[in-house]
Amino acid sequence: MHETPHRNTETKITAAAPAGMFGPFLRAPEASRDIFRVIFVAACGPAVAGVVFFGWRALVICALSVLGCVATESLYYRVTRTPALLGRSHAALTGLLLALTLPPFVPWYVPLAAAVFAILVGKALFGGVGHFLWQPALVGRLAATVLFAPPLLARPLLDRPAWPVLAQNRILLGDVTRVDRSARYRGWRGTVARSPADAVARPRPRAFLRQLSLPGAKPPDSIATVLRHMPPAWDLICGAHGGGIGETSTIVIIVAGLYLACRNYVHAYLPGMIILAAAVTVAVAPVRSADGQAWQWLPVAAEGLDVGFVYVAYHLTCGELMLAAFFLATEMTSRPVTLPAQVVFGAICGAGAILLRLYLAFPIPAYAAVLMANTLTPLLDSAVRPRVLGRRRWQRTTDTKHQA
């Protein structure tokens, strides 16, 4: 008898599937490691943008996170010999996605500890690739937020007063921790840091938006007043503002996400549904009035549609929403399989991210919303199913009774 040749333990996954179809197919199969490598290359786009605006420290954090994930998975495999942990490509992808969610000024041990949690708790305990419930990179990010809140944030569970970004004359090679706090920073263009500083500090854009709804914050006079203190729209689109390494550059994230959608690694309606649900929630979620006593519903129309649409656009482009929509919520194992379930999943992620941002002082609202939606994935897959073609809905119930 012929011996079966050894095969790589990584399964075959079809990327170029017809639109509206899911699961493994016979046409155009691709090894899972190849898919992970393509997504890794796409995720390098936001990482490069982060290195440009946050300097060499962002590159070091990315390297530590990737090496930490690969080393942890290799050591765990040597002990347990779990077949689904044999590949290194998914571990490297997990490490890069984890690094994109971290601030560029964290100490060196934060990405390493977060990488251990991402692999052991997020993936290995469930059996490896294809078996985990939560997005492993987000498990590591949540662990870093809980364990290292003081190094990550100025005070637990609240935004730092100011987050640094390299000045225009210090991009790429500057040290983001050397901040010129005396510099007057309204927009990034033309900013110059005085030696020996390399960066300028500015409150995160979402910190201004939270003043409209967060309990305990002094309510502003109007939405327009808050928008006047926001950075220019160009800063949010290109990424020249404080945030996680891969969170800030909206244009790079969208281009990389559309590339994955063209390769059919990401179904475009899932990130689209997340963004749509977030926009609708921002448009209708109430904000506080100037006296702080009453709540004003439908803020998109409260001060004119021109102010309302700018308010919605700023919510969509600041923070971690775009990164979560295109790279984290779309993870193949932790998201639902069917189209109706993915629509519900996207609505939960988008609406949950905005509600957590507006009404709770939580540092990673969009990531927490994705983790909550991941928890519901088995329920969504079993409850939200498409109707079998040629069969009426009542027939499914009848067939189930006959089988019982």
Image (spheres, rainbow, N blue to C red):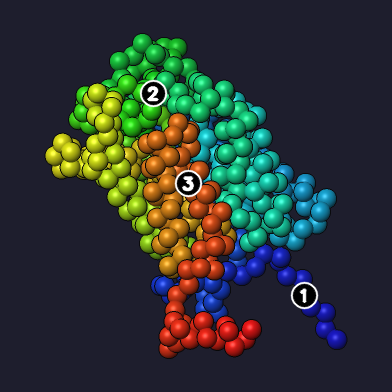
* Residue drawn at (45%, 31%) of the image: 361
CB atoms at circles 2 and 3 under 8 Å apart? no
352 or 115, which lies in front?
352
Quadrant for the N terminus in the image: bottom right
Disc 2/disc 3 C-alpha distance (Å): 23 Å
Q: Position of residue 17 (x, y in %)?
A: 47, 73
Residue 401, located in which quarter of the rendered image? bottom right
> Which amino acid does the dot numbered 3 rest on?
Ala
In the image as oriented, which residue stretches furthest toward the right? 1
347 or 402, which lies in front?
402
Give the labeled residue for mark 1.
5
Q: Position of residue 318 (x, y in %)?
A: 36, 37
Give the labeled residue for mark 2.
216
Classify 10 Å Cα crowding around label 1: few (below 14), some (14-19), many (20 and above).
few
Give the labeled residue for mark 3.
369
Up the image or down, 91 lies above or below 269; here it is: above
**Residue 167, visible in the rendered structure:** no
Q: Position of residue 279 (x, y in %)?
A: 30, 48
Residue 313, numbered label: none
Q: Which tag is nearer the camera, tag 2 or tag 3?
A: 2
